[in-house]
Amino acid sequence: MDYLSAYKYWLEHAPVSYRDMLQSMEGNSLALRECFGSELAFGTAGIRGIMGLGCNRLNEFTVRRTAQGIAKWLNGTRLPKRCAIGYDSRHNSRQYAEICGAALAESGIQVLIYHELAPTPMLSYAVRKLKCGCGIMVTASHNAGMYNGIKCYGEDGCQMTDEPAAIVYREIQNTPYFLLPEKSFDQLKTEGRIEDIPASVWEDYCDRVMQEGLNLERVKASGLRILYTPLCGTGNKPVRELFRRIGLQAEIVTSQEKPDGDFKTCTYPNPETDAALNESYKLAQKLHPDLIIGTDPDADRVAVAVPVAGGFCKLSGNELGCVLLDYILRVRSERGDLPAGAEVIKSIVSTPLADRIAEHYGVCMYNVLTGFTYIGGEILRLEGLGQEDRFVFGFEESCGYLKGSYARDKDAVVATMLVCEAAAYAKENGMNLADYMDALYRQFGCYCAYVQSVELQGVSAGEISKAFMSKIRENCPTELAGCKLTATVDYLRGVRKCLKCGKEEPTGLPKSNVFTLELGEQGKIILRPSGTEPKIKLYYTAIGKSWDEANQLMEQLKNAMRDYLPE
């Protein structure tokens, strides 16, 4: 169906109350293409999109249709017919949560919903704690305020994997847009088919996070001065409760304390960007904290910065991951309680410096595809062997971290606790976290990392992305910036090919549209389409004996890749 036909269908079948709004779009070909030119696709990250009318927008109809698809999938399995639902501070999040709850309850599924804002990891925890067959989190994570989304979780608390996601998507496509509910959310709640998640689950989650502390007395004795921002999201309550429990008094960035779907003081609340902490920097100039901590709107990612001469140093997601990894392995090695076969898990796009750190402590590094669902899946594998204690730490470069197996998604709350511990340790030794990271660079080498996002515009963005990935595979360079390619890794074929001998070896990972150019000891470039936005992402690693050498190589690699990128 082309965009005009889709628009006409909506104009004829949508409830009358939406007629005027739809008619106002008539003749605006750009708006019609954007809103009706395609349908939101459901994948392992669920659905995510700009809120508005149309099949390519998030609205009550696309949300209800998605929930109906999830319900049909769940009813076709042997999983418990129970679903936990959480939601963040974005516009319409509570409304969309109620729409999902009503659609599932009408399909015979018992719904348990948080009565207030809850972080994504708390939803993952609830799925397992309440023995649900699936879970739904209404969030667009770190995206701008115009976005929202539906994340779906399996019974293991992990984000849904490819096979069930494909079934859900098929069921969604077979579901009409305008099957309206027979009963309201409130009616279904009165009937007992929808219940609030018990407050005890919230307390249990906080208790479980505290169990992941390594030396909390160190934090209490440190006198750390913390400045914290929840970036107008869900972290405000659980993170401040954490501070209370570990004995820290934290100053709060009041302009970002309360929930705000517009994110007025931070239009792009992404912890990966320095701009996310701009309000914190202003306040820090007056308060002079030891440490700035920020959590994103659904509190599954964390950002950290420390004051340095002339301003502030924000650690990248890779850098904070390496600091936390080294701190955890250092403490546990000194205590002698690292389990036999201890395992650290990270995404393939995260810095190889972490592999060096793990090797230093004699710990196995397990690399998985991008997306915390794969880290959660590896924890599940260990759990199936009765060896989940072997899981020591998991992280991905996009500021997501997890210690402990209580949840199966990244958790900014537990990460905040670990950050405070690492900062206290650094302070004991006359350092801050930036100094800690510099010490790791001196020990293991200069690993320069950079993530490039190539924005794609219009309804053909998906096709442009596919064409680019095909082109790089078919016309793979043999040299970049004077560095010879030593190997390629095609995760779509599932093979790593040595370019010197031509030998191919299986990656051992699920197939995915990701391609890696390896440059031996000098670095690598990983290319993949974004799973949630119309982007192509390139992950660069440049390794040098000095920072001048590493930074120079990084610039040369970025320049060399310009010839291959879509215009």
Image: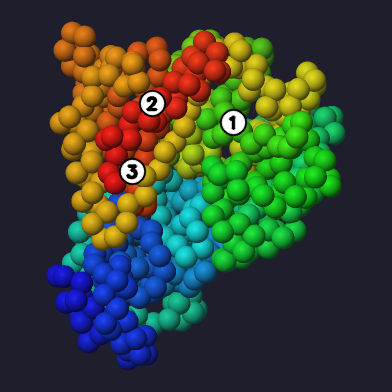
Identified at 54% across, 35% down, the residue is 317
Identified at 48% across, 48% down, the residue is 124
17 in relation to 417, above or below: below
Q: Quadrant of the N terminus?
A: bottom left
**Amino acid under disc 1:** Leu
Which of the two labelled residues, at mark 1 and mark 2, occupies the earlier sequence position?
A: 1
Separation of residues labelled 1 and 3 (CA atoms): 24 Å
**Amino acid under disc 3:** Ile
Identified at 84% across, 45% down, the residue is 287
The foreground one among 134 and 297 is 297
Identified at 33% across, 43% down, the residue is 536
Which of the two labelled residues, at mark 2 and mark 3, occupies the earlier sequence position?
A: 3
Between marks 1 and 2 in the image, the one whose residue lies nearer the viewer: 2
Between marks 1 and 3 in the image, the one whose residue lies nearer the viewer: 3
Residue 549: image x %, image y %? 50, 16
Residue under label 1, please give it.
320
Instruction: Tell how many labels.
Output: 3
421 in relation to 25, above or below: above
Which of the two labelled residues, at mark 1 and mark 3, occupies the earlier sequence position?
A: 1
**Amino acid under disc 2:** Leu
Residue 341: image x %, image y %? 46, 15
Residue 334: which quarter of the image?
Answer: top right
- Colour convention of the picture: rainbow
For label 2, the SS is: helix
Q: Which mark is residue 536?
A: 3
Whether the residues at callouts 2 and 3 have beta carbons within 8 Å, the answer is no
Residue under label 2, please give it.
557
For label 1, the SS is: helix
Residue 178: which quarter of the image?
Answer: bottom left
